[in-house]
Amino acid sequence: MPEYVKRERIVEGWELLKIRDAASPNVWRLAMAALQIGLRVNKLIETHEEWLMQRGDGWWLAPSPGQTKIKGVPKMVPLNSLAYEALFGKTPRIGGRFFHHWKDGNSFKHTWMRTCERAGVHDLHFHDLRHTFTTWLTQCGVDYAVIQTLKGEPLPGSAKYYIHNWNARLRDAVTRLETFTKAVLNGENDVQVPVTATWVPVVQNVNPLTMRNVVPRDRIELSTPAFSGLCSAN
């Protein structure tokens, strides 16, 4: 029997530019969210506006918990400006799920395949963007422990008990990732990454997260208004 070979595909810069030209605005938003946040497609699609909170250093996202212990999900993820723009888009919204156009990853799969076909990009799974997220963070010089934390993966041994100031480390990582991504989108080869965090612009029409308006992440069902939406092949 052949041994299992782990998939190591990531998106190349030229491929990303072709996908940007071929994708609809909503597909491009979801792709950029995957590259900047690193969540799996199902977690991105179910992301709700009320799961965001603003802190002193910018916006943070509290994803819904994972269904199993095998697939890690981070408790909190800092959002850089590219991630924030990917979630909210440029068109007016009335709240709820950011990507209500699709029910789950399966309903989005064929849309992604058609987009890659139009772009002339072959054998690129949407999950490969999560691999790209990890690879780009490594190229930015981000520590292994920080990358694992952003992915929601456990750290070996007792490492998590001896590493402190996590918020600043996580924020710095996604800031470096933002600069790297912008360079890729500009077709630049020599990428310079910053060592300090940047601010994410504040939008006045977004209510801060409070116990009164928060929607419990483990209580939202497909049948509720907070999770439902018209599914389309955008």
Image: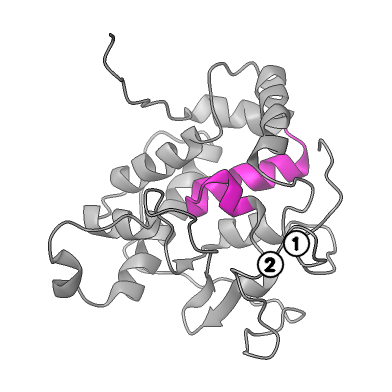
Q: Which residues are magenta?
A: 23-44
Residue 46, compared with residue 59, is above or below; it is: above
Residue at 58%, 56% (x, y): give it: 82
- Left or right position of 33 against 5: right
Quadrant position of the C terminus in the picture: top right
Front in this rendered view, residue 101 or 176? 101
Whichever of callouts 2 and 1 sits on the residue coming sooner in the sequence is 2
Q: Secondary structure at mark 2?
A: loop
Residue 106 image point, x, y percent? 66, 36
| Residue identified by numbered label 2 | 220
**Badge 1 amino acid:** Phe
* Residue 68 percent location from the top left of the image: 43, 53
Residue nearest the viewer, comparing 202 with 32:
32
Q: Which mark is residue 227?
A: 1
40 or 25: nearer the viewer: 40
Q: Residues within 10 Å of mark 2 (few under 14, many from 20)?
A: some
Quarter occupied by the N terminus? top left
Please indicate whether residue 174 sits to the left or right of residue 64 in the image.
left
Marks 2 and 1, how far apart at CA = 6 Å
Residue in the image at 77% along x and 79% along y: 205
Verify whether residue 24 appears in magenta: yes
Q: Is residue 200 above or below residue 188?
A: below
Residue 185, image x and y in percent?
55, 39
Residue 213 x/y as whole percent: 70, 85
Is 149 situated above or below 166? above
| Residue at disc 1, secondary structure | loop
**Amino acid type of the residue tagged 2 in the rendering:** Ile
Q: Position of 44 compared to 157: left or right?
A: right
